[in-house]
Amino acid sequence: MGGIVAPGRARGDVRETPPWPRGSRPYALSFPPRPGETARRTLAKAPLPGSQHPLLARPSRHAPGVKSRAGGHMDASAVDAVIVGAGVAGLTAARALRRVGFSVAVLEARERVGGRTLSQSLGGEVVDLGGQWVGPQQRHVLRLADELGLRRFPQHHRGTKVLEVRGERRTYRGQVPSLPLLSLLDLQRVIWKLDGLAKRVPLERPGAAPRAAEWDALTLEEWKQRHVPTWGARAALDIATRAVFAAEPSELSFLHFLFYVHSNHGLMPLTTIEGGAQAERFTGGAQTLGLRMAGELGARVHLSTPVRAVLQDEGGVTVTADGDRAWRARYAVVAVPPALAERIDFGAALPPERRRAHADLPMGSVIKVVATYERPFWREAGFSGEAVSDTGPVRLCFDDCSADGHHPALVGFFLGETARQWTHRPPAERRRAALESFARFFGPQALRPTAVADLDWIAEPWSKGCYVGLPRPGALTAIGDALRAPFGRVHWAGTETALEGCGYLDGAVESGERAATELAARLSLPATSPSRVQVVTG
Ligand SMILES: Cc1cc2nc3c(=O)[nH]c(=O)nc-3n(C[C@H](O)[C@H](O)[C@H](O)COP(=O)(O)OP(=O)(O)OC[C@H]3O[C@@H](n4cnc5c(N)ncnc54)[C@H](O)[C@@H]3O)c2cc1C
């Protein structure tokens, strides 16, 4: 097969006729306004620097129809946009572009879609081994879920909670943990203080915060040592940090911590169930988000396709995957975590700030464990199923029963240093340790599950950890806007690039919509390059 064809569906072979003449259609995709909207619209309207980029002056090593590096002929296909990564962000971008008539190909390294979401059957009910909850503030993901027709149900939270601190098991009800009064007062002051400081970090440019350089050089641990006098407030801050970031306070840039809190509507919404980020779950699991979108995209999604190079020239982008397969596109959206983008060759002109983003946003560390039971024995004993611990190895636990309560389950998390300690241990030993934690929280019945499943996200080669990439101290200010700024014809998505909901499903959706808006603007400009209608295959 060879010759000249229009941008095609999956492999450059089917013309997709847009309902308007090329170049005449307004670019705007209709997403509701959000923080930074003005700036984004400006970006979308301004001529982007693609054609002036120094990289575009030289021909691609992978122009269609040429020999590949491996010497074989390339299997090149042409589309408007190649999207790298079929997580929620990449699929959101692809779906949005597709719905306004652009042709897309989505290339995914794994043999499944959904990335950091994974829903699987356990004990007769679907459980989530990756991303799971959504909250009322998370409007991007909630709107997408509604569009896709997904149903949600409230996270169970009624009953007594468990707090394990300094080796002592305490119980409490409501929102106020069982700590000494002085610690509680200190904790409330610290929450107000941190929420106040977070609001001073501009989401578009954290580096423009009043004391950005100083805060970026400081770790959350160092800030805590200076500003939090009571042991109880310190312990609560440590526990909350591990739960929210899957990292230790000593690993986090204080500036990034504040950015993240601002991006996610404050500390309390981040850490609570009722009215917070853990308020609801998806019926059928969170992976249904990606599965539904992939269903709409059909053969445009290519699984088991690890991308190795995204190289651009004057006319477009050539994306090369394992097996010497290549796709030709006008633009690309790279929707993988920065730590995974490090493995992709973007050519010598990739700006140093962007290289730094790939090198200095290591992923957090989490192992998630779900155990199912005959009976919800913790509910029957008056417990909500919520437990936090500074002892571990399970440091955070929730009730994970099905919506109707008929499939009792608990879910636990190994987080930060604890997850790293357990990543190399045998899975059976790890599961046993998780059950022992559950038993300490709620009673010995926890040692008798009907089934147990766990997922060590550190060992996942296409995630390298989770929940999210975390800038090392000093990196956020050095990277500047390179996390989001397009590199020639390459645009970036993924929850790490989100202004709102960063780190969460909400941020993945927000970033996918933003990248689609950027691309739609450029794709709607009059087509000047003949290469967009060329494809030559072997
Ligand atoms: C245990 C756990 C619990 C979580 N809990 C929650 C929660 O309760 N609520 C919430 O909102 N969020 C939660 N999250 C975070 C949430 O899952 C993520 O923010 C979100 O899924 C990120 O989506 P993404 O599309 O940005 O990235 P990803 O899901 O990582 O998608 C990137 C995709 O790119 C692919 N890829 C990587 N490299 C390449 C390559 N070279 N070529 C081709 N493909 C490639 C990957 O395989 C992946 O499919 C949790 C995550 C984990 C792991």
Image: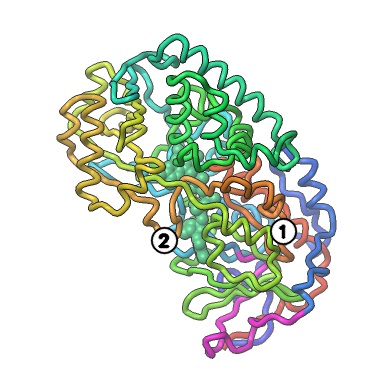
- Tell me the tag on residue 486: 1
Q: Which residues are magenta?
A: 58-82
Quarter of the picture holding the C terminus: bottom right
- Tell me the tag on residue 216: none
Visual colour scheme: rainbow
Looking at the image, which is closer to me, 140 or 419? 419
10 Å crowding of disc 2: few (<14), some (14-19), many (20+): few
Task: Please name the amino acid that badge 1 sits on.
Answer: Pro
Looking at the image, which is closer to me, 212 or 191? 212
Q: Relative to 395, does residue 174 appear above or below in the rendering?
A: above
Task: Please name the amino acid that badge 2 sits on.
Answer: Pro
Name the residue: 56% across, 27% down: 226
Please tell me whether mark 1 sits on a helix, a strand or a loop. Answer: loop
Name the residue: 37% across, 25% down: 156
Look at mark 2 in the image and give the residue it sits on. Answer: 461
107 vs 402, left or right, is: right
| Distance CA(mark 2)–CA(mark 1) | 26 Å
10 Å crowding of disc 1: few (<14), some (14-19), many (20+): many
Q: Residue 536's x, y, as percent?
A: 63, 85
Q: Residue 478's x, y, as percent?
A: 68, 51
Q: Relative to 421, does residue 170 appear above or below in the rendering?
A: above
Q: Relative to 405, does residue 330 appear above or below in the rendering?
A: below
- In the rendered image, which quarter is residue 328 located in? bottom right
Name the residue: 58% across, 66% down: 105
